[in-house]
C-alpha cells in the first residue's frame, strides 16, 4: 500500500467521525430516547473523544458544551499533520 492511500483512508475516517459529532450535536437538541441502536452507536463512538475534550475544558458556559468544537478542531489538526507528513515523505 502506498502512503497516499493510507492518508486518504485516515482522512475519510476523520470525515465520518466529524459527521458523527455533528449528528450528536443535533441529537443533543432533539433529546431522543437513547435506546435506539443507531443513537446508542453514535453516542458510544463519539463519547471517548468528547469526554477527553470535556476534561480539558474548564467547564460549560451557560449550559453549552464546547467539547464538540474542541474535538472538531483536534480532528482537523490531526488531518493537517497527516497531510503535511505525507507531503514531506513524497
Image: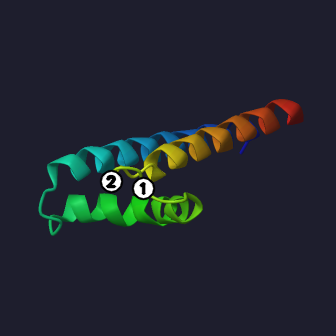
Q: Residues within 10 Å of mark 1 (few under 14, many from 20)?
A: few
Dots 1 and 2: beta carbons under 8 Å? yes
Q: Nearer the viewer, residue 89 or 75?
A: 75
Give x and y (percent) for residue 50.
46, 59
Task: Give the residue furthest to the front.
Answer: 62
Task: Give the residue furthest to the bottom.
Answer: 35
Task: Give the residue furthest to the right.
Answer: 89
Residue 60's label in the rendered image is 1
Horizontal relation, residue 58 to residue 17: left or right? right
Q: Secondary structure beneath disc 1?
A: loop
Q: CA distance from mark 1 to mark 2?
A: 5 Å
Q: Residue, x 41% and y 50% (percent of image)?
A: 61
Residue 5's label in the rendered image is none
Give x and y (percent) for residue 68.
44, 48
Q: Nearer the viewer, residue 72 or 85?
A: 72
- Specify how the rendered protein is coloured: rainbow
Q: Nearer the viewer, residue 85 or 18?
A: 18
Q: Is residue 58 above or below residue 8?
A: below
The residue that label 2 is drawn on is 63
Quadrant into which the N terminus falls: top right
Q: Is residue 52 above or below residue 62?
A: below
Horizontal relation, residue 29 to residue 17: left or right? left
Q: Secondary structure beneath disc 2?
A: loop
Asked which quadrant contains residue 11, the reply is top right
Give x and y (percent) for residue 26.
25, 44
Badge count: 2
Give x and y (percent) for residue 27.
23, 50
Amino acid at each position: 500500500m502506498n502512503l497516499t492511500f493510507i492518508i486518504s483512508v485516515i482522512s475519510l475516517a476523520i470525515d465520518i467521525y466529524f459527521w458523527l459529532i455533528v449528528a450528536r450535536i443535533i441529537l443533543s437538541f432533539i433529546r431522543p430516547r437513547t435506546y435506539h441502536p443507531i443513537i446508542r452507536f453514535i453516542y458510544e463512538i463519539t463519547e471517548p473523544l468528547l469526554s477527553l475534550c470535556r476534561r480539558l475544558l474548564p467547564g460549560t458556559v451557560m449550559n453549552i458544551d464546547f467539547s464538540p468544537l474542541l474535538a472538531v478542531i483536534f480532528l482537523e489538526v490531526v488531518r493537517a499533520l497527516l497531510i503535511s507528513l505525507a507531503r514531506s515523505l513524497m
